Amino acid sequence: MTGKIIKGIAGFYYVYTPLGLIECKAKGVFRKEGIKPLVGDNVEIEIIDEEQKTGNIINIIERKNSLIRPASANIDQAMIIFAVLKPAPNYNLLDRFLISMQQQDIPVIVCFNKLDIAGDDDVETLRNAYEGCGCKVLFVSGIREKGLNDIKDVLKGRTTVMAGPSGVGKSTIVNALYPQAKMETGEISRKIERGKHTTRHAELFAISPDTYIMDTPGFTSLYLSGIEKEKLKYYYPEFEPYEGNCRFNGCMHLSEPDCAVKDAVDEGIINRIRYDNYCSLYRELKDSQKY
């Protein structure tokens, strides 16, 4: 029998099948081969007890793709959710996520939540920064269900991983899209303005017959791996029109004179938030490659 893993907790995998939800363990052969089943995996299982709905995963069907963080498989796109305010968006973390998804050829939708408490200037700052990054950008209010239809439109017919830092209202949006999820939405600590980790495991929900969303635990850091500092500029689509227009071939757009990208930043054509993130990440990659 085949099914899809919709949740994995403490070594148990919950597989959706024609018989309903089957609680499975993974065969020892997977551990031996260093393979871990992922939420989103299509699998073959053997039933141990039909009445108790238990079984074993005996085979993982070939994946279309897989993500390390958030750990998931067979993903069509990612939606990264940040708050417009409370907590203020961490631009560096957002760029890390965008680059990580680009490395894996996963299209990204950037969704800014808590529009209900945002001013026009807050929205404009974010719009200017990220509408040129090659991703669709949405502004919504999960708590007021404003912009929910825009989210549904971009999710339709796809499997989407929903990711973002704690406290940005991700679970509120998931609850609005799929009320059966009955997730805790957690309060933000007023003292540090960071959310409690209310989602502790990845879980897949079918919000329509051909549309799945995967909620994942909140994260506060993301390490970039497998990328050379010289290649980083190619992960910033805003730079592309200016490649080849600098004085020096192979310009890194940092301290070099007559740099077309820096000129575009000074002229306000390329957003300074994005450019500053690029410089910061370049320095980080440079330092890490020394060792």
Image: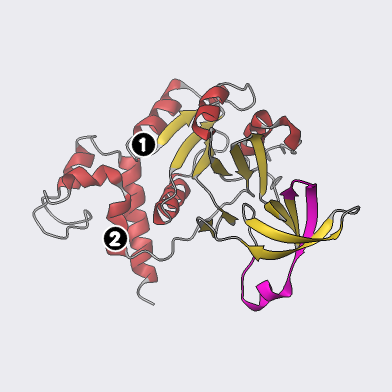
Q: Secondary structure at mark 2?
A: helix
Q: Quadrant of the N terminus?
A: bottom right
Name the image quarter holding residue 198.
top right
Amino acid type at mark 1: Ala
Left or right position of 28 against 105: right
Q: Earlier in the sequence, mark 2 or mark 1?
A: 1
Most foreground residue, 193 or 289: 289
Q: Quick check: can you spot residue 278?
A: yes
Find residue 247 and report its horizontal and vertical position in percent.
8, 54
Q: For this view, does 67 lie left or right of residue 271?
A: right
Residue stretch rendered in magenta on the structure: 16-36
Q: What residue is shown at x 17% (from left), y 57% (from top)?
A: 251
- Of residues 248 and 162, the one nearer the viewer is 162
Front residue (pair 285, 191): 285
Q: Where is residue 274 drawn, in percent x and y?
A: 34, 44
Residue matched to label 2: 231
- The quarter in which the C terminus is drawn is bottom left
Disc 2/disc 1 C-alpha distance (Å): 21 Å
Q: Which residue is mark 1?
A: 129
Amino acid identity at mark 2: Lys
Q: Label for residue 209?
A: none
Q: Position of residue 69 (x, y in %)?
A: 55, 57
Asked whether residue 10 is in view, the answer is no
Q: Is residue 34 magenta?
A: yes
Question: Can you name the residue that lies furthest to the front here?
Answer: 1
